[in-house]
Image (cartoon, helix red, strand yellow):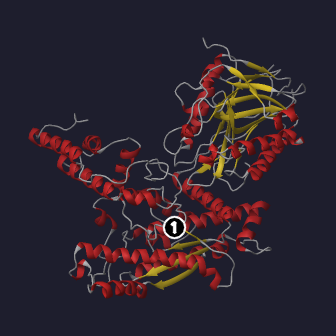
Amino acid sequence: MGRKVTVATCALNQWALDFEGNLQRILKSIKIAKNRGARYRLGPELEICGYGCWDHYYESDTLLHSFQVLAALLESPVTQNIICDVGMPVMHRNVRYNCRVIFLNRKILLIRPKMALANEANYHELRWFTPWSRSRHTEEYFLPRMIRDLTRQETVPFGDAVLATWDTCIGSEICEELWTPHSPHIDMGLDGVEIVTNASSSHHVLRKANTRVDLVTMATTKNGGIYLLANQKGCDGDRLYYDGCAMIAMNGSIFAQGSQFSLDDVASRASPYPRVKVDFALSCHEDLLAPVSEPIEWKYHSPEEEISLGPACWLWDFLRRSQQAGFLLPLSGGVDSAATACLVYCMCRQVCEAVRSGNQEVLADVRTIVNQSSYTPQDPRDLCGHILTTCYMASENSSQETCSRARELAQQIGSHHISLSIDPAVKAVMGIFSLVTGKSPLFAAHGGSSRENLALQNVQARIRMVLAYLFAQLNLWSRGVRGGLLVLGSANVDESLLGYLTKYDCSSADINPIGGISKTDLRAFVHFCTERFQLPALQSILSALPTAELEPLADGQVSQTDEEDMGMTYAELSVYGRLRKVAKMGPYSMFCKLLSTWRHLWTPRQVADKVKRFFSKYSMNRHKMTTLTPAYHAENYSPDDNRFDLRPFLYNTGWPWQFRCIENQVLQLERAEPQSLDGVD
């Protein structure tokens, strides 16, 4: 007869260095697991200190406070009679490791260090940790005095081992180890391990959930048994949003699925493994009539739904943890700022749903933010009116259409809306320049040079940034309300990649929820909001041509469009972005790839010109990436210079060697015409 075991995994909204809050969330998750009959509780990676400590891992305080939290967990009656698997950094023989600490009834059973470290893209674990390289080997770890006094243990096993209970065998993986070609669970399964746990801190990227689910189900399809995955959830203090998705799989099927986005804080020939014997069972004697779990079908979100949920949850975490009173958004009447406004509206919808469902923690956060102890949001528009201020900043180059579109959208989502003119400030700044130099620059439409034209556009853009911060600081004060506002940016990932923005304009803000999302996905998201939330103002925004409105109007109509300014379409920009970052291509390899991809659309000469134009503009504007507003990370081709896309910002923008290689290839192909290009790779 089969044994029935109850195991629990979780997704916790941990916060880097918030040791008190992290402890309470861990205890809450253990209590929930025990109340549901679980005998084993798995938590996320580095949950005690929070994953995003970054260089704080170097500090001895981080290690000390982690052990203090571990001591509190060992001492708590909540952790009795359940195997607890928690994550924290541990120093062993003067080497820092990313570890799981597994304990039962005030006794540490095993400290299991991570063996494969994540060290690409947003992950830099090798900067702080060393991988454990001694497979299937343990050493004695001497416990610090504060732990030794509690457990009455001098040493505990440290290394790659598994737990052998009375009724099963349990092995551990940590995050990245699941993603490696030869994951530990393979050899564990061959050595008789029946339950594999994985503690993760895996951040959200659009369309990533499918890969994560496939890896977990495949692990149990090959070896059988049970696989538990725990993940961090929420904004940990920076650009990343950890999207939960805790799950339990067995024999190739999903049996439990945690929410991906939520405002809740707690949600063969292999050599044998060393076995740590545990005087404990995960099953009960009287389990004959106990119900067993049935397989479920994993519920995937569409990319548009992911955008409506992930960045919105990130905004909520940022707002409540920064202790600000809301957001200020420069609303231009275009798709990007409209998408940002929609994300705040989506956030308000989630908050209202959480309050209606009885979430007292969310309600308490809302009341703190709006500084009203008895306030209860009635609907998203009501909440939006309290926490979102939108501001349309017109100039003499703005059209009436964009002003109307911004005003209508603000009315439909319920934001507090301001319309103002920046012309007096622009005239004052340019007056200072003329007074000092005796020169008055002109727009190109009025006979000015390209230098004059660009400078006049940039002055308008930068004055908008200054005014945005002024109103963010003092607008609530002028209305007799306490607090300040976070300024939201709304430059999309494609414009950032190309540098199609003014340095220190409205792209400079406190945070940017759409900075990692492509224009294509943003348009799809805005269309989704039009239908899902009945916001008809978005229809006219979608149908309008994207424009910066920084040059003079022609007969009252917009004379400047984004794609004309950039010299390429947004769809092309997404292609360049993915090839540059994800496929790791330079100018020549990108040209060769696009020759094949675009062979029915463009000649080799046209493809070459497009690639050269992109790399010239990208390298010329790369310096702007050093000042990009911290943005929600949603695309793997983000040009974020801070942690994700580490490259120089001073280039030889002529790319002489690379462009010469492209030119030689084009000439060779032109001489060979009209032969087919199908063989080019």
Residue in the image at 76% along x and 71% along y: 376
Is 359 positioned to the left or the right of 637 in the image?
A: right
Residue 374, quarter of picture:
bottom right
Q: Is residue 107 above or below residue 555?
A: above
Which residue position holds label 1? 509
The tally of labels here is 1
Residue 610 vertical position relative to residue 550 in the rendered view, above or below: above
Q: In front: 74, or 189?
A: 74
> Looking at the picture, how far across and down is residue 667, in whole percent?
12, 43
* Vertical arrangement, residue 56 with respect to residue 212, above or below: below
Q: Position of residue 343 (x, y in %)?
A: 56, 64
For the question of whether residue 207 can be seen, the reply is: yes
Q: Relative to 431, say whether 90 is above or below.
A: above
Q: Residues within 10 Å of mark 1 (few under 14, many from 20)?
A: many
Q: Secondary structure at mark 1?
A: loop
Nearer the observer, 664 or 219: 664
Query: Which image quadrant is residue 678 in?
Result: top left
The quarter of the picture where the N terminus appears is: top right
Residue most extreme to the top: 269
Residue 295 visible, this orientation: no
* Residue 138: image location, x then y, percent: 69, 21
Q: Write the residue at 72% across / 68% down.
A: 366
On screen, residue 487 versus residue 91, left or right, reads left
Give the side of residue 131 with respect to residue 482, left or right: left
Q: Nearer the viewer, residue 175 or 112?
A: 112
Quarter of the image where the C terminus is located: top left
Instruction: Say which amino acid is labelled 1.
Output: Ala
Q: In which image quadrant can residue 62 be found?
A: top right
What is the x, y in percent for residue 442?
26, 82
Q: Residue at x 21, y 52 (%)?
A: 609
